[in-house]
Amino acid sequence: MALPKKKLQGLVAATVTPMTETGEINFSVIGQYVDYLVNEQGVKNIFVNGSTGEGLSLSVPERRQLAEEWVTKGKNKMDHVIIHVGALSLKDSQDLAQHAAEIGADGIAVIAPFFFKPVNKDALIAFLQEVAAAAPEVPFYYYHIPALTGVKIRAEELLDGIQDQIPTFQGLKFSDVDLLDFGQCVDQNGQRQFDLLFGVDEQLLSALAMGATGAVGSTYNYLGKKTKQMLEAFEHQDLSLALNYQLYIQKFMNYVIKLGLGVAQTKAIITLVSGIQMGPPRLPLQKASKEFTLNAEAKLKSLESHCFH
């Protein structure tokens, strides 16, 4: 088994998928997007084709082409390109996993199938095993997001003995607010053999205190620099400063969540901050309103003028 070249830690941006006004993928801006993340946000890890990337709204050929583009454009610039290969069809998931291995992805991640759902841990592990086996040299991550999948199997239950069943298992993207479950995952990870990546951006400081080794999220596309400053303050044991950064992030998040925050709105914010046109989401999601974008822009400006830098 190939080990990861470098530990996956710190911030991982869950990338959006740039699209044209007609809903086709706009591959032409991926290189620019990579440079923006590295140079403007200081983020050198990405999670491609996940929820934020509308992965499950894309066809398998689109997902393959997009994965290839991110790996190619991220070469020698990104530390880790993780490809989400989860799908409702086991065969699609295996196909995507094998392809990710062929193009040199640094890891693959899989969501629980959520139409016909696994009813218990054994059923979920059996599915994950089959996908992981299609890419036997690639570090494997389970993407735990029960609010979207409706699969309520606890992450701590899943972790128990998982490397015996999935030798390539490298860690977890934990997108849930249940810090009891997360804490039990940390407790099981006493040797720090797994990457425990927290996925609820506005609560990251709490997860760091519990022992998160990194974080995957959509806000690191535009609040990456601020969140990195929070991580640095936490590492230097300056909890007061770290909390100030978390509250800054929360003020913005709280505001946009109340306005209605989804993939479309995330695309609008990234377009606003980066200057790169991310376009609309794919149906059934609806485009963000101009009013949302104006309000988000005004809130960011007011936070910048009233808060520290």
Image (cartoon, rainbow, N blue to C red):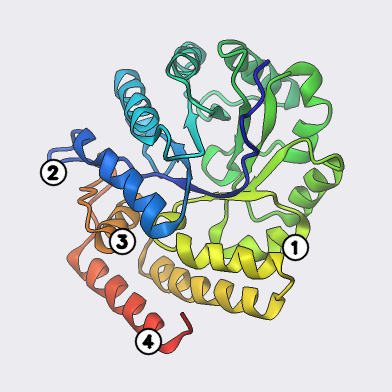
Whether residue 254 is situated above or below residue 267 in the rendered picture: below
Q: Is residue 262 visible?
A: no
Select label 3 or label 2 by which is in front: 3
Specify the quadrant of the image occupied by residue 40. bottom left
- N-term mark: 4 or 3: 3
Disc 1: CA contacts within 10 A as few (<14), some (14-19) or many (>=20)? few
At mark 2, the secondary structure is loop
Q: Nearer the viewer, residue 22 or 303?
A: 303
- The tag earlier along the polypeptide, 3 or 2, is 2
- Residue at image mark 1: 209
Residue 21 marker: 2
Q: Which residue: 30% across, 18% down? A: 61
Q: Position of residue 71 (x, y in %)?
A: 40, 29
Disc 4 target residue = 305
Task: Please give the name of the residue rendered at 18% of the width and 33% of the height, measured from the top-left corner.
Answer: 24
Residue density around tag 3, few if under 14, some if 14–19, many if 20 or more, within 10 Å: many
Q: Position of residue 52 (x, y in %)?
A: 41, 45
Residue at 80% across, 41% down:
192
Q: What label sits on residue 269 in the rendered view?
A: 3
Secondary structure of the residue carrying tag 1 is helix
Name the residue nearer the viewer: 8 or 208. Answer: 8
In the image, is residue 42 above or below residue 161?
Answer: below
Q: Circles 4 and 3: CB distance less than 8 Å?
A: no
Marks 4 and 3, how far apart at CA: 18 Å
Q: Amino acid at mark 4?
A: Ser
**What's under tag 3, amino acid-wise?**
Ile
Q: Earlier in the sequence, mark 4 or mark 2?
A: 2
Closer to the chain start, of discs 2 and 1, is 2
2 or 1: mark nearer the eye:
1
